[in-house]
Every structure is written in structure tokens, then in C-alpha cells.
Image (cartoon, rainbow, N blue to C red):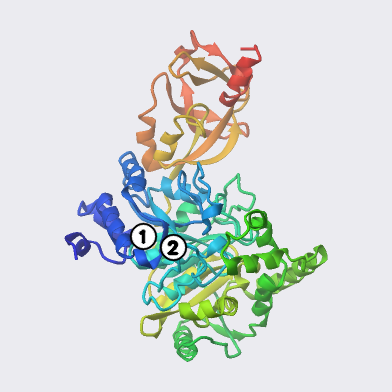
Amino acid sequence: MSKLDMKIPRELTINWLQAQYGSGKLKPEQVIEEIIRRSREDEGMNIWITPPVLERIKPYLDRLQTMDTSLPLWGVPFAIKDNIDLADTPTTAGCPEYAYVPDRPAAVVERLLNAGAIPVGKTNMDQFATGLVGTRSPYGETHNALSAEWISGGSSSGSAVAVARGQAAFALGTDTAGSGRVPAALNRLIGYKPSLGAWSTKGVVPACASLDCVTVFTHSIDEARIVDMQVRGLESSDPWSKEMPRWVDKLPKKLYLPEKPLTFFGPLAEEYSKAWDSAVQRIEQLELPIEYIDYDLFEEAAALLYDGPWVAERWASVGEFIESSPGVTFPVTEQVLRSGGSGKHDAASVFTAMHKLQELRMISNKLLQEAVLIMPTCGGTWTRGQVEADPIATNSDMGRYTNHCNLLDLCAVAVPAGDAASQMPFGITLFSLSGNEHLMENAAAAFLEVNLPPLEAKRQETILVAVCGLHMRGYPLEKQMLEHGGQFVRESHTAEKYQMVKLPTVPAKPGLLKKKVGGTAIALELWEMPVASFGAFAALIPAPLGIGKIELQDGTEVSGFICEGYAEEGAEDISACGGWRNLDRYEESGFA
């Protein structure tokens, strides 16, 4: 064991890392060095597709030098499931022949980078996120973090094991049928699945686009909420994204447990049944009303996922690739996906299923008002050999208590609940209605006997900044916005009171001046930036530019780039172009 390993615990957490950085006892470079060492030591576990190497990580380490150390995730290493884009790094979705190299990160990754987090690599997964076992990958079967004989769970297998093995403080996964929860249960982690649309899926290879969620694996509810606070929020360029603000923390008014005995499976079925009984006893000791209900509603919804037409949505996502690339897909994955293209589900069956699901949603929405449903995350588990012998049935069993979640538009959090056997974790999942993460979080915290810090302590104070030139997306100085934690919000226009001039600088840049009379509306972008970073950012702005108040079309005022009046002399008036993005076209037209 190295001296460094003695200093850095196997369980990396956001709070521990930030405390060490703040005290000066540890540097991000040392953490990355240890993560690289651990990943090489665990190479045979098939955790990574793009593993941690210093060459790829160093630009993010260097970037930290320009960022405020008070950012919520400054220097915190995280892993990314390989169906989620990281700029200039291949996205494979678990299929080498499918790989492409994106030039921008996924929306959630970009927000984490802006909060100071360090991406260390891309993790292994069940190919095309089709599987709950962690064995359906041409990059090898991801081993369970605690016992190599058993499955790791999927499809976010590598992400969960990376956190459990101390190679990331947290990791992004995805969840359509349980992929962000099953691996959490099997590797003794928190698996946090937000409401549909709360975290953007822009830059994520779709499985079922209407049901897909980005998720996170952590060691605590508190740290899952820290991540949630950074990535939650509307992404204007994502058609599936929603504005879903957080509610004030409170406990649910009621907990629901299944009335009928549950079915457990696999070689440890008896042990899982006893672990569930023990968890129920703990739940019954909480100071919350409990009601036992018929679980049939949720089973009926779950059956729609693979027996209904949603499997055809998976085929719609990758069917064209599979047809054009015969023989490259993992055999069992192709079998599952092709079932969606078999013609079994015609237009009428799609609408029949949608109408049935809407009815089930209506019932569950009434039932779960201010309540939380609790179920086992998994009803059992399998050895890797057993999954190889019967890949379809074993995989189906793993989703028995998870498949209903996204169809019914629920949020969920999987938490550890003791062990079913030696080195075999058992977990439960708490479900609540869309937008009610606060209920499931606080019920989970009560079960785990932990206190959750107030959410306000995690929220960055931000300022809205209007930019109209080289700091806009795609221009050379966009990097300054990103380095200071800026996040693009939306496009907008000034009030019809402004003049834009082209300053005689190298490179040329615009100057925005407010007129006493006349003027026009100028296109600009609105960005959100942490207040903690804003002062350092403003200090970079050269004269005659500066920060002042800009009036928008709707009459509101925001901070933004303005130009001192003296610069108008000798500058070219380009107001007629309507905005900096239109300048080239304006000049080519001959009107300049």
C-alpha cells in the first residue's frame, strides 16, 4: 500500500475531498494520481471503456487553476457512463462500431464541469443501455465491486462499480427500466433517479427517449442532492427538458408497503426475503403512518415496458444502425432490440398501451399524493454464470420491482438496507411522484438515520449576465464563461434603445451603447454565473468595455456587457445587422 493510498480512503466522497482541499492537505492532482493507480489495479474488472489516464484528465486539472475554489464540485472526480457525451472523447454506448466523438459535452456534464468537477473517464455498460445485469458488453462483463462471482447490475454497471471501488466520488448513469438503481443495490450505493425531464438528456444516446433519465451514484443522499442542485433545470435546446424547481424539505404524510408477500428469485431468494422482512421492520419503526396496498397497479405498468410497444421505441433509436451493421451488436442485445422491430406493435397497439398507461398514471397520481412507496430494489440476484446460461429470464427478473418507475413518471432513490448475505448488499427503493424528490429523500434519510443539510446550503448564488459578442456560444471567449462557471440560459434581445458598434480592435469586437432617443433591439445571450466567480470574470474585461445594466425587451434589467460612450467615435455603427452573429452576412450583403 502506497503512502498516497494511506491518505486517500477507498470511499471517496464530495464532502471529504472538499474538506481536504480546503485545509491544503490534498490536491486534485494527487487524487487523480491515485484514481489512475486504482483503475490499473482493477483493470480485470472491466469497469472502464475509456479509462482514467493523465493525458485526458490534465486539461480539466489545468482548468481548475482559473476557477473559484468555492465552486460546489471544485476538484471532485466523477465518472460518466459511455452513452453520455464528453467532448473530444468517444461515445460508444457499449458498441465500438457505433462510436462517435462529440465536440460538446452532454448538458448535464457541462453543468458539472462548470461547477468544478473533473471527468476521469467513460464507464462500461450493457450495450445500448439494454440490460440490468452488467454482462452485455463487448468490453467484458463488469465485475461486482464486492464479489466477482456475482453480477454488478446494469446497464450503468461501470459507473456504479467505479464509485464503489473508489475510482470516482460520484458517477453518472442512465435509467429507463432501473439501470440507475439496480447497480446501486448490488454495489451498496445510493442510486438517485430524478423526475423525468428534471435533468436534461441532451447529449445522451437514447434508449427510450420518452422514458430516459440521467442518474447519479453516490455514497450518500446528501451528495446525490449536491449533484442534483448543479444539473437540475431547464435546458432550452432539449425537447424533453422541464423546469422543475425544488420544494422545501419535508417528510411524506404516508408510506406505502406492498400488502401481499413478494416474490424473490435466484440462489439467494431466501436470504433476500429475510433482508426485506428486516427492512420492513425498520420502516415500521419510523414515526410515519404506514399503509399496506395492492401492488398490482405497479406490476401492470411494469409489464408494459417490454411486453408493450415501448420496446419499439428502442428499435427506433438504434434499429437503423443494427440493420446497416450486421453482426456487430452483442447477440442478446440484438435479440431484445429486434423484438421492437418485429411488426408486433402496430399504431393501434401503441395507442392502446398509451391509453392504458394514462389510466394507470391517473390512479398512481391519486394514490401517491404526498406519499412514498417503498419496495425492494431487486428481488434477488444471479451469478455471472447463471446470467450467461439464461440471459433473457435472469435479466427480466432484475427489473421486477423497477420497471414501472419511469412509465408512471415517478422519481426514485435506491438506498442500502443491510446485507442479504456476506458481501451481498440488499437495498430498497423509495418512489414518489414527479417533482416530489424532497419526499423520497427525506423518507430515505429517516430510514438511514441521517440528517440532510438544508438545500439552501448547496445552492450557488448566481447572477444573470447578458453577452453580445465574443463571449457567446461558439466564439473564442466562450471558454471564459465556462471557466467561471457560466451556464447558457437562453437567447434574448435588448429593448429597442441600443446601438451596436464594431470596435477597431484585434480581433474586432462589438460595443453596446444605450441611446437617449432612437436605437434598435440587439440580439444577445443570457448566461447564469456564480456570484463567487463574477468578480474575477469582470476583471478580465478590457476597456472600453465593462459591466453595466442592460434593459431587455420585456423591460427587465440584467448585468451585461456595455461600452463607454467615448468609443463610439471612430467605431463603425453596425446596429442594422441586429446582432453580432449576423455581422458576416450583413457585411457580405454590402450594407455595411
**Frontmost residue, 578 versus 121:** 121
Residue 103: image x %, image y %? 50, 41
Name which quarter of the figure residue 49 lies in: bottom left
* Residue 109 in sight in this render: yes
Residue 339: image x %, image y %? 69, 68
Identify the residue position indicated by label 2 in the image: 159
Asked whether the residues under the numbered discs 1 and 2 touch, taking CB atoms below 8 Å apart as contact, a structural biologist would say: yes
Q: Is residue 292 above or below residue 508?
A: below
**Frontmost residue, 89 versus 253:** 89
Identify the residue position indicated by label 1 in the image: 168
Quadrant of the snapshot with the N terminus: bottom left
> Of marks 1 and 2, which one's residue comes earlier in the chain?
2
Residue 557: image x %, image y %? 54, 33
The residue shown at (53%, 71%) is 132
Residue 509: image x %, image y %? 48, 20
**In the image, farthest residue toward the right:** 348
Q: Amino acid at mark 2?
A: Ser
**In the image, farthest residue toward the front:** 327
Q: Amino acid at mark 1?
A: Ala
Element class at badge 1: loop
Quadrant of the snapshot with the C terminus: top right
